[in-house]
Amino acid sequence: MRLAILGCGTVGSEVVRLIQSQSADLTARIGAPLEIAGIAVRRPGRDRAGLPVDPDIFTTDALGLIKRDDVDLVVEVVGGIEPARSWLVEALRAGKSVVTANKALLAEDGGTLHDAAAAGGADLYYEAAVAGAIPLLRPLRDSLHGDTITQVTGIVNGTTNFILSAMDATGAGFTEALEEATALGYAEADPTADIEGFDAAAKAAILASLAFHTRVTAADVHREGITRVTAADVASAKAMGCTIKLLCIASRGTGADGAESVSVRVHPAMIPLTHPLASVGDAFNAVFVEAEAAGQLMFYGRGAGGAPTASAVLGDVVAVARNRIAGICTASESTYAALPVRPMGEAVTRYHISLDVADRPGVLATVANVFARQGVSIATVRQASAEPVDPAAPGGDAILVIVTHRATDAALAATVEELRGLDIVRSVAGVLRVEGGS
Ligand code: NDP
Ligand code: HSE
């Protein structure tokens, strides 16, 4: 089995190292020797000290490498949409199976890759694209195919989980925690994809597609990042026996119109400390799957890093190499259900709202009336004195913390809009969803 490896950065270099160090075992597991035919990179002259390969094996001509007759399988660990998409379509249409970790491409235009795989009779495997080392996609794609998955709830971004865990542990604000994550190498120099939820949204689309037999793209996912989570939100969560996590939530259910549909969203949320995801700290990932017959399942481990991600890549390499030897390939996707994606306004959950209000008679009644008008039922109200926002304003201020019963996102948004228009409400200090509990 001769392998073209596209990319030799954080993940690619570990893939190369593992192939070389486990050569005999991989040969035994596959049933044929696994050899690296070539490695495509952007800068072939870059110092890759310690990488156990002949320097002549590097090329900048990825397409030429893919097309070589002696290449059987292609591993893509470059990332991004183009040129990766064109390379992989070329490989798949030519019947060369592909292993990729490229969640951005799969979430944006996975359909093109799946179609090319079907056309070429090739395998398309991508276990490393979601939650790094954790065996998750193949359990969804294979092991749970006899069941009906109802919800997938995950912490699928290590950087944001590190930041939120640090805020929870030390009381630090978002900026301070991000600085710590950057200093320790968890956050990238440009952390936008992580902290604004793009990375998690791509993974959510991939998970929802597999779980619900429906093609879901990143554009279908409602996305909010963690940049507006404050130390006060974290403290308020603690007071309620909760913690804040960036969750991806993909669920299947019946909408207001009675039709079956799916909802896929990524946003920060409070979850009770008793929830299995609450104890997932640092940069770890975990995914909680609920299925009709299997019940609740939990997958936990390292979601990023060179070696953990390379472990998932190599697992796929062994699988597709075995398939090739057996002369078979597995269907890369199942989209027969083709369920519609519900708009975010129809998502139903509970909410935690902090309001900075004037502290005088009738304020609570006025605020409660707004919730009543919008059909949002209040579960609890807590009041604390606050420093006045405007010291010149008459009377004191108070912080009202309201937790609602389950309501639609649209009803909650209308409530917040109306609250913002009240003169007794100095500011809507925070709105967070509350998940995973009664
Ligand atoms: P890196 O940036 O570390 O490596 C990218 C590699 O691609 C480099 O070797 C680079 O070459 C090469 N490359 C870039 N552009 C080209 C080009 N035009 N032609 C040929 N080679 C090119 O990325 P990572 O290893 O971190 O990530 C790779 C993939 O794995 C991405 O899709 C990412 O989302 C995914 N992933 C990464 C995880 C992680 O922890 N890092 C976890 C899970 C998934 P050169 O070395 O010459 O610069
Ligand atoms: N940047 C991602 C994370 C790792 O922080 O989890 C790659 O998916």
Image (spheres, rainbow, N blue to C red):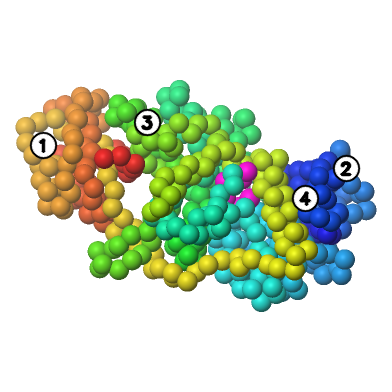
Residue pictured at 77% horizontal, 50% vertical: 29
Principal secondary structure, stretch drawn in magenta = loop
Part of the protein shown in magenta? 128-133
Quarter of the image where one finds residue 188: top right
Q: Amino acid at mark 3?
A: Leu
Residue matched to label 1: 363
Residue pictured at 30% horizontal, 39% vertical: 437
Residue matched to label 3: 273
| 97 relative to 434 in the view: left or right | right
Q: Earlier in the sequence, mark 2 or mark 3?
A: 2
Say which mark, if any, is on residue 52. Answer: 2
| 284 relative to 272 in the view: left or right | right
For mark 3, give the secondary structure: loop
Q: CA distance from mark 2 to mark 4?
A: 21 Å
Say which mark, if any, is on residue 29. Answer: 4
Quarter of the image where one finds residue 10: top right
For mark 2, give the secondary structure: loop
For mark 1, give the secondary structure: helix
Nearer mark to the viewer, of 2 and 4:
4
Q: CA distance from mark 1 to mark 4?
A: 70 Å
Q: CA distance from mark 3 to mark 4?
A: 42 Å
For mark 4, give the secondary structure: helix
Q: CA distance from mark 3 to mark 1?
A: 32 Å
- Image location of residue 209, percent across then percent down: 49, 61
